[in-house]
Image (cartoon, rainbow, N blue to C red):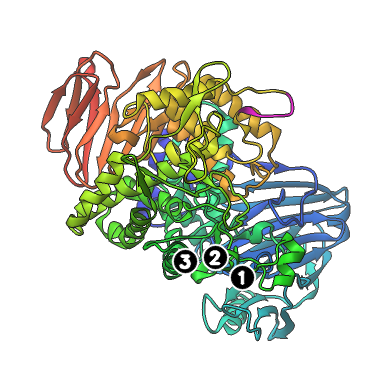
Amino acid sequence: MKHALLIAAAAVLICGCATHQDPVLNELDAYKAEFTEWPAHVPTDMTADAPLAGNGDIGLTMKTAEEGITFFIGKNDFWRALQSYPEGGLALPGALLLSSDVISSGAYHAEQLPGSAEIRATYTLPENELSVTAWVAATDNKVVIELASRKEMSLDLAFLPTEDGPLASVISQGTDEGCSWMTRSFCDNPRLQWDSHVALALNHATGSLTLKPGKKQTLVLAVYTNIDTPEWKEKAISEARSCLGKDMAALKDAHRSWWSAFWNLSHVDIGDEWMERYYYQSQYLLACSSRAGKFAPGLWGPFICSEETAWAGDYHLNYNYQSPYWGCFSSNHITLTENYDQPLLDYMEKGRDYARELLGCRGLYYPVGIGPLGLSSAAWPDTDEKMDDQYGYTDHLLDGGNMFWGQKSNASFGAVNMMMRFYATWDEEYARKIYPYILGCAEFWEDYLVLRNGKYESVNDCFYEEWPERGSDNDVNPTCSLGLIRMVMRGALEISSMLDVDGDRRSRWQDILDNLSDFPTGYAQDGRLSLKNSDRKGADSRSEDFKPSGLNRIHMHGVLIPPMVSGPLTDARYSGIMLDDMNHWTTREGSDWGGSMSNGVETVYAGAARLGFSPEKILQYLRERIEMGSYPNCYIVAAGGGIETLAAVPFTINEMLMQSFEGTLRLFPCWVRSQDASFRHLRANGAFLVSASIKEGTIGDVELLSEQGRPCRMENPWPGQTVLVRHSDGSTEELQGDFVEFPTQKNEKLWIELLSTRI
């Protein structure tokens, strides 16, 4: 996007309306994803390769095949609420099928447009062409499908009920004053934690649909669950009925206004259209998946096209649930993270029970996977017979009936995104919301850690997921846990100070910080110092039975990305070890740098930027990784990952353009100096919105908006030169040094310039 277009977009927003010529939407639509072949991975229990649309609650997956166009409708709040893995999890509400000879025989071309948030497809024969535009209203529970043809034609229209999976459902269909509807329910089963109902209502009767040349036909599908409203069925039918014969222009204007405002929150231009496409498409797909006030998305977001989703589509807490959001904070898309906290807060009562009953501790102890409304999605099968059949182990009440897999850090890992948002916003109201959770994590480690020889140790705490047999000799001091403990203690200290509470507890937290075991290292075969997964096996063992493994994503999750407890400025020695390990990563045919084909694409490259790895190689390796595994819809595919991969490109690019961990703002810290770039309103820790550019290797003037009036510490963008800081009241400061510090006022705009360029 060019600067002039952004100014025009701002004018549109000030007017309070969006038009079909909105410059932001038009510019973002240039990053379209294109399809010329029918999807090959639909239906699937993981990531679909079809065109996708959504509004953060309802997801639309558009499959074209011999039978026609199938619109799979997913919804983040439609769960089989069983506490028995893998029987529970997200379920498929249903689908709508459009079929005709033009679809099955015509030449296919589709586009996924991130700016206007639409799917556009054409099916072309010599004698006719069918055009289809589909979108999920950003401000309403409606899916809109616009149809047009060159010649008169007929289509068959039908609901496709979902075939039952692990649990039988009740499905019904009917018509109501020209509208057709379908419902699906999981109910009347004592094993359910709550009943789930969904209704899909269409503003047209199923059967035959006739298109007239030159006349658009609009189908509107209203979708509601009992989570939305107790009158879920009545609401869906009444809204579909209200759309009979109505023009959807007002709904589309509201839809486009929402997306225009979303895209105007921040902007990057890196002079690489290929990478920018993945940057913006990733943000589009996440915005389609997550919305404030709605259930948080599971592993696959709302793009559900199969009754059984892998890993129940749940909230996996040893990184998968957290990682989709990691690019949102620096991209200034904080609103996409609004729904993240609620499942973790809803689980606190159970987490306290597990800590007390299983470990004899206060605080929060969470299993690997949870769901919404306090659901234990990663529970063992509910009978010994099922347990034996699935896992070859007969105790279905192992570890209280839940899958902890030996890991003690899942609740603290859940706190990662809370702390990222806190540091990015310094919002006192938000701090009050999350403090009980942070306090619960701190209390857990206060009780669980063992003090031995003056150092606190985390014992029987697995680095990887391990089979949780009682009495097993598990890890001591896993690197990831040590990093998360540091993050929790620092967070408890800072938030309690902000809120002026629990002052008498801070000395204990500081003591743990001061005396926590060092991150484990050892000497590799070539004699260099390298990272270890954990110190050793067994609480009492003193042997060095963990050999150095080198840096991998799990180390980074606890130390670097995203907890921010180590970095080049605060821990140069340890950062040097990590960087040296990273320099020993290799690429080879059929594999990838950093091992991110399996998991961790959202971690490896952003972490490399934080460590100061070669920016040229980061961009090269990231592109190679995407080319090795991605779909036409710009979904980066990983063996175990779903929407988590959507953070990979935004998080990496933002970290290359701007960093703000370690209490210091750094501009273009890991950028290719010969490649011009700019950004607008990236969010820095300390609640700063920052805009800057680099041209011919020189950083230009910097604009900074201070939301909370905190002091700013910045690495001098012009080493050895004098920095001029201009405040909005007209006052100025001249600063020198490798790092410059200056005060700010709340909601103040400041300009940072190289003194010699001022006229």
Residue 411 image offset from top left, x and y in percent: 45, 56
Residue 108 image offset from top left, x and y in percent: 80, 47
Q: Is residue 661 magenta?
A: no
Locate the C terminus by quadrant: top left
Of the two numbered discs 2 and 3 in the rendering, the one whose residue sits closer to the viewer? 3
N-term-proximal mark, 2 vs 1? 1
Residue 654 image offset from top left, x and y in percent: 44, 35
Decide if residue 685 is in sight here.
Answer: no
For the point 61% across and 47% down, the residue is: 113
On screen, residue 89 versus residue 36, left or right, reads left
> Label 2 sits on what residue type?
Gly
Q: Which residue is mark 1?
A: 79
Label 2 with label 1: CB-CB less than 8 Å: yes
Q: Residue 323's mark?
A: none
Q: Is residue 590 magenta?
A: yes
Q: Which residue is mark 3?
A: 354
Q: What's drawn in magenta, residue-wise?
A: 589-593
For the point 68% across and 44% down, the residue is: 639
Decide if residue 627 is in sight here.
Answer: yes
> Label 3 sits on what residue type?
Tyr
Label 1 with label 3: CB-CB less than 8 Å: no
Q: Which residue is mark 2?
A: 371
Asked whether 668 or 311 is in front, the reply is 311
Instruction: Give the quadrant of residue 330.
Output: top left
Work out how far the residue at label 2 is from the one at label 3, CA to CA, in angstroms.
16 Å
Asked whether 307 or 407 is in front, the reply is 407
* Few, some or many residues within 10 Å of mark 2 (<14, 14–19, 20+): many
| Helix, strand or loop for disc 3 | helix
Of the two numbered discs 1 and 3 in the rendering, the one whose residue sits closer to the viewer? 3
> Label 1 sits on what residue type?
Trp
